[in-house]
Structures are given as C-alpha cells and as structure tokens.
Image (cartoon, rainbow, N blue to C red):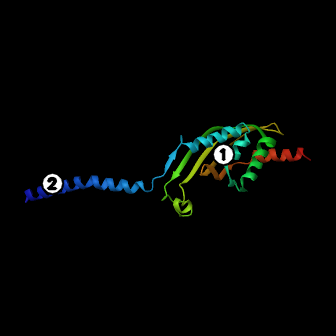
Amino acid sequence: VFFWYMLDKKIMETITLTLLPFILILSSLNAEEEKSYLKTKDEISTKIRKYYAEMSKENIKFAETFFSEDVEVSINDLKVSGKKNYIERLNTIHKKLFKDMKVEELHVHTNYFSPEALTSDGKTAADISPDEPLIWTNAWGTITGVGRVTNKKISFRMHMDFRTSKGKVIHMLAYYDPTQMNEEIKALEASEK
C-alpha cells in the first residue's frame, strides 16, 4: 500500500511540475492584455517639459503649436474652450499678471493606456479613444514668479494633466490653489481704474 501511495504521489508531483510552467505562461499572456505603460523619457513627456521651459521664457508662440484648435481646458472649476481663448488667458498671465515665472521640482510622466484599461465612468480606453491609443501626461511641481502689479513673490503647488492626440494637446486639466493669482488679478483690476 505504501508503494502505491508513493507512486501516486510521484505521478502527481510530475504532473504538477509539468503543468506549472504552462499555467504561469497562460497567466502572463492574459495579464499582457491589460498592460498600460508609464514613461518619463518619451517624446510626449519631453514635449510637456519643453512647454514649461518655453512658458518660463514667456514664449506664447510655442503654446500656439502645442495645443489643438479645439483644446478643452479645465482649471479647477473654470472651463476654457478653444486654443484662441486659452492663448488669450496665457497672455494675460504672462504679460499682465506675473513675470519671472518658473516651474520648480517639475515631474512629468506619460501614461499609455491599454485599450482594456477602465476609465472613471466604467468604459474602457478603447471606448473613449477608438481610433488611437489613449495617452495622458501628468505633471506636477511648484510655480514661482513675481506679481507685475504687487511685486510680490508667488509660489504654489500645481498638478496638470494633458491628453495628447496626433501630437497636440486636446484636453488639459490644471489643479492649484488660486489664492495668489486672484490677489494679483484684484491688484491689476484696481490699478486699471
């Protein structure tokens, strides 16, 4: 009886060791289907870094090549539709409100989403972007500068997201505390009265 038990145990070990690699390979193949990628040295991340560098130089012309014509911008709860309107806002920020603006401690990475990746509404990335990959870049850092009217130094943390399509930003989200910007806007408005 002990002989048969040991023989059955040996057969089971052999079967298990034979099947285990196949199970692992099949598991990894299934996992590949939903694999999204995050990159920091890719062309899109590099272009986003360049955007911040050019804005630090007040090079609004670069922004005109960076955004699509129908870009949708959300800044906290403010919505700005279209490149023309957003460029107008950039000109106000850089030419009337602040000087010497920089982004310090900048981190940028780009997410290349798998077609099967779930979005916030339960749809997949392929549902949202059926004709091309869904690509979002995340950036965060500290914006510094000096108010043009008040001559006060500013510094605030920001987080921005950029959705890219065909080499252009089609959607941008920006989150930051607007207190310092609002103070400079009030000072500018008072100086124009």
Instruction: Locate residue 98: give its quadrant.
Output: top right
Which residue was labeled with disc 1?
158
Kind of residue sitting beneath label 2: Lys
Judging depth in this view, the residue of 89 and 43 nearest the camera is 43
Say which element carries label 1: strand
Judging depth in this view, the residue of 23 and 65 nearest the camera is 65
Q: Which residue lies furthest to the right in this view?
A: 193
Q: How crowded is mark 2: few (under 14 residues within 10 Å), some or many (20 or more)?
A: few
The reply, left or right, for residue 151 in relation to residue 107 is: right
Rendered location of residue 168, percent (x, y) = 63, 50
Per the model, the C-alpha gap separating discs 2 and 1 is 62 Å
Q: Which residue sits at x=72%, y=42%?
A: 61
Which residue was labeled with disc 2?
10
Kind of residue sitting beneath label 1: Met
Instruction: Locate residue 71: give its quadrant.
Output: bottom right
The reply, left or right, for residue 177 in relation to residue 41 is: right
